[in-house]
Image (cartoon, helix red, strand yellow):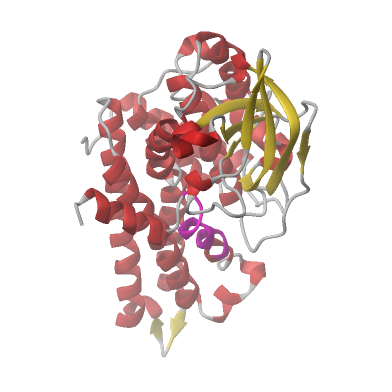
Amino acid sequence: MRTDYSEKQKELYQNTLAFAQSELQNPSAQFNRERWQRCADFGVLGWFIPEQYGGTGLSITSTIYALEALGYGCNDNGLTLGLNGQMWSVQEPILQFGSEQQKQLYLPKLCSGEIIATHAMTEKESGSDSFKLKTTAEKVSDGYRLNGEKTYLGLAPVADLALVFANSNPQAGQWGISAFLVETNAAGVEVSQPMEKMGLASNPLGAIKFQDCFVEASQRLGPEGIGVSLFTQSMDWERGFVFASHIGSMARQLDQCIEYSRNRKQFEQTISKFQSISNRIVEMKTRLEISRLLINKIAALKDNSEPAMLEAAMTKLYVSEAFVANSMDAIRIHGALGYLTEHEVERDLRDATAGVIYSGTSDIQRKIIANLLGL
């Protein structure tokens, strides 16, 4: 795992930081398609995608480094999470499992911002128990008919494409699950309005219902019954990297706390001199560096085509909880000012809280880690 960066990587970092600071400030209260398009035009969505599919072909390490810069410069956690969500939970599975036709059809459009995609696995009765899904894909002439409902899907209300998991062979249980690329304007697809939630306002959450929705066999992603394997492998990427930009948010958050503590005076000295304040900042710095190391380790593994299931689960667990802890410390350092919405210190806590739930709760990550350790 590298601990330094090339001049080209540093240049990308600085350019991304400058772009984010000038183009992506002031969080939106709802999804902003114009901001999404700015990121696509800058190249964010195509960084790790090969050039023949509309991307830049950067290494995973370079991509993660640039995504950190994006998170530092952009204080809209919902936007950066949405970008990472599409990249790692939809684009990467298409790149890994898609046919050449599917890659040529969808990846350039996803990279350019022409279309937006959502990952559709979760159902009301199968959240953590993902493979107990009820959505079915009944085989018919030349394809399948989808029936069921997916929910709590990031970007669903604005998505043009959904990566849908459905059971095409119920007799086989979870081994009958297949994956499909479904355009949301297709007949039999109903997309909900955005759900109200406590944070990540610019990343809309919604549901998608399928009622006798016909999909051609060519829309299946990978062979029949590969759903479990596809989902499990894609979770390595999502859990490992979905917080890449949150690392930048945590770094920005830390710098803001240091600056505030050096300027805020109480009892005739700056509050940075009080150990209760400095200790919190030390903890914030330590959590940030551990989080950064965990994500960079997975990037190094993926650049070498190595599996990272254990590392991804540990990263998802640690970074999600570290962002919550750092956000709470930031509020306490700022005191009453940190609690007021007008100063936006508290917004990071509202945004961070979702991280311990989506992509597998912290408890599920602990279960995965324990299982992989043979416990």
- Horizontal placement of 372 versus 24: left or right? left
Q: Does any portion of residue 41 appear in the rendered image?
A: no
In the rendered structure, does residue 356 fall within the stretch colored magenta?
yes
Q: Residue furthest front?
A: 171
Which residue is at the front of the view, 66 or 7? 66
Q: Position of residue 339 (x, y in %)?
A: 58, 76
In the image, is residue 248 above or below residue 190? below
Say whether residue 334 is left or right of residue 164.
Answer: left
Q: Quadrant of the N terminus?
A: top left
| Most frequent secondary structure within the magenta stretch | helix
Residue at image location 78% in from the left, 48% down from the top: 193
Q: Nearer the viewer, residue 250 or 149?
A: 149
Name the residue: 62% across, 30% down. 137
Question: 37 above or below 244?
Answer: above
Figure disc tally = 0
Q: Quadrant of residue 147?
A: top right
Question: 365 or 174, which lies in front?
Answer: 174
> Height in image: 345 above or below 65?
below
Locate residue 223, reporting x and y percent: 47, 19
Query: What are the residue bounds of the magenta stretch?
Result: 350-359
The quadrant of the rendering that contains the C terminus is bottom left
Q: Is residue 62 above or below residue 315?
A: above
Looking at this view, name the residue that lies furthest to the bottom.
Answer: 267
State the image coordinates of residue 299 (x, y, percent, origin top left): 31, 35
Question: In this view of the protein, can residue 10 be seen by the observer?
Answer: yes
Q: Position of residue 326 (x, y in %)?
A: 41, 65
Residue at x-position 56% and y-position 51%: 77
**Which of the two residues, 315 or 142, is positioned nearer the viewer here?**
142
